[in-house]
């Protein structure tokens, strides 16, 4: 369920869909997450369990931590799963994280890939 937005907010959101970050999303570090919204969303590809990580429940999320998000192994906490194959999403605010946890799909532009563009293209 989306919250009501003003026409100006809708126009601004539509314009931002075409703006791409100046950095490769695969190189996002925990410092960037902490300074931004402070929320990292993780979804298990095996069972679909979702979790929103913040500085309160993830020790990696703090300013100054230059560890890349893709370099850390996340393990599903579901007892019968335990998979380490996960999707990571960054840059969402608290409202978006709550809606995502409730089952809404996440914007694919927020996905943090496991390989950089150069690794994918074989440079």
Image (tube, rainbow, N blue to C red):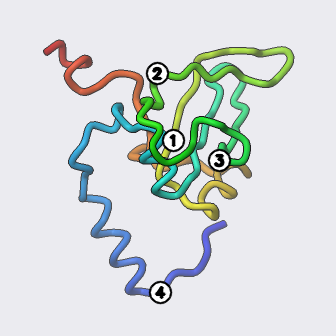
Distance, label 1 to label 2, CA atoms, is 14 Å
Question: Which residue is disc 2 drawn over?
Answer: 71
Please give the residue where the numbered disc 4 appears in the rendered image. Answer: 6
Residue 113: mark: none
Above or below, 54 relative to 75: below
How many numbered discs, if any?
4
**Disc nearest the viewer among 4 and 2:** 2
Upstream in sequence: badge 1 or badge 2: 2
Q: Secondary structure at mark 1?
A: strand
As helix, strand or loop, the secondary structure at mark 4 comes to: loop
Which of the two discs, 3 and 1, sits closer to the camera?
Answer: 3
Viewer-side label of 3, 4? 3
Q: Quadrant of residue 62?
A: top right
Q: Residue at x 58, y 50 (%)?
A: 39
Name the outermost residue toward the right. 79
Looking at this view, is 10 or 65 the one in front?
65
Compared across the picture, whether 76 is left or right of 119 comes to right
Quadrant assignment, res 76: top right
Residue 123, image x, y percentages: 13, 15
Residue drawn 26% across the image and 19% down it:
120
Find residue 34 and report its horizontal and vertical position in percent: 51, 50
- Name the residue carrying label 3: 55
Q: Which residue is mark 1?
A: 89
Structural crowding at the residue carrying mark 4, measured as other residues with C-alpha within 10 Å and reported as few (<14), some (14–19) or many (≥20): few
Locate the N terminus by quadrant.
Answer: bottom right
Q: Report the Cα–Cα distance between label 3 and label 2.
A: 18 Å
Q: Is residue 107 left or right of residue 118?
A: right
């Amino acid at each position: 369920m989306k919250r009501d937005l003003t026409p100006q907010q809708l126009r601004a959101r539509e314009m931002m869909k075409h703006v791409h970050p100046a950095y490769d999303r695969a190189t996002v570090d925990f410092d960037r997450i902490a300074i931004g919204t402070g929320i990292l969303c993780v979804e298990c590809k095996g069972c679909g369990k979702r979790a929103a990580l913040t500085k309160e429940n993830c020790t990696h999320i703090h300013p100054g931590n230059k560890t890349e998000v893709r370099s850390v192994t996340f393990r599903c906490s579901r007892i019968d799963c335990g998979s380490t194959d996960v999707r990571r999403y960054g840059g969402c605010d608290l409202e978006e994280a709550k809606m995502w946890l409730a089952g809404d799909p996440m914007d694919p532009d927020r996905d943090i890939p496991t390989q950089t563009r150069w690794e994918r293209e074989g440079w």
